[in-house]
Image (cartoon, rainbow, N blue to C red):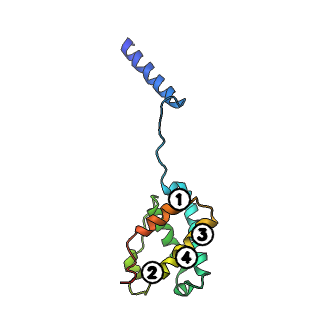
């Protein structure tokens, strides 16, 4: 082998070894919210707790009296998974279409947000991740509330 090739290989090994030993300041890639939440299994737990809160909440549960709960849960899992940066793709209608003509009010949205926050608290989701998730969900297309 030529001296240059040996020198190049030894430099590559030295840099690789230094990086592995923490001698070079490598910043890990930031984990997605999806990963920080625990992936799809954790999102399923969040949705189960959230829907349980909603169905037990007399402020809102009448709106869900005729709901196909398993289908609702599946749609919510996909929606949250996608919104959090996971691999899921929501197959449901967009939010405004899904709630068109339903009479959903801003107060209903507040109750749902409260029920979701309680589910996240129950599952001990860190406050920063809760805030990020609620912020992302709050940016999804409007329900058309009050319009």
**In the rendered image, the vertical position of residue 29 relative to residue 94, given as above or below:** above
Residue of label 4: 70
N-term mark: 3 or 2: 2
In the rendered image, which quarter contains the N terminus?
top left
Residue bearing mark 1: 129
Compared with 16, 128 (above or below) is: below
Question: Distance from label 2 to label 1 (Cα)?
Answer: 24 Å
Q: Nearer the viewer, residue 87 or 101?
A: 101
Identify the element where label 4 is drawn.
helix
Q: Residue 128 or 20: which is nearer the viewer?
A: 128
Q: Which residue in the structure is indicated by mark 2?
A: 106
**Res 95 → quadrant:** bottom left
How far apart, in angstroms, are the residues tagged by discs 3 and 1?
13 Å
Q: Position of residue 118 (x, y in %)?
A: 60, 70
Of the numbered discs 2 and 1, the one sitting upstream in the chain is 2
Quarter of the view holding residue 121: bottom right
Is there CB contact under 8 Å for labels 4 and 3? no
Q: Nearer the viewer, mark 3 or mark 2?
A: 2
Q: Residue at x 38, y 75 (%)?
A: 142
Mark 2–mark 4 distance (CA, rounded to whole Å): 25 Å
């Amino acid at each position: 082998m030529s001296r240059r090739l040996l020198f190049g290989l030894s430099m590559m090994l030295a840099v690789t070894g230094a990086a592995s030993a923490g001698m070079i300041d490598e910043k890990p890639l930031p984990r997605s919210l999806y990963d920080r939440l625990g992936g799809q299994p954790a999102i399923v737990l969040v949705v189960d707790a959230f829907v349980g809160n909603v169905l037990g909440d007399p402020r809102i549960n009448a709106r869900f009296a005729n709901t196909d709960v398993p289908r609702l849960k599946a749609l919510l899992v996909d929606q949250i998974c996608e919104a959090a940066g996971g691999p899921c793709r929501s197959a449901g209608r967009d939010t405004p279409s899904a709630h068109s003509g339903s009479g959903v009010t801003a107060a209903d949205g507040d109750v749902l947000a409260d029920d979701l926050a309680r589910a996240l608290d129950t599952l001990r989701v860190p406050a920063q991740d809760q805030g990020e998730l609620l912020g992302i969900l709050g940016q999804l297309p409007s329900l058309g509330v009050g319009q």
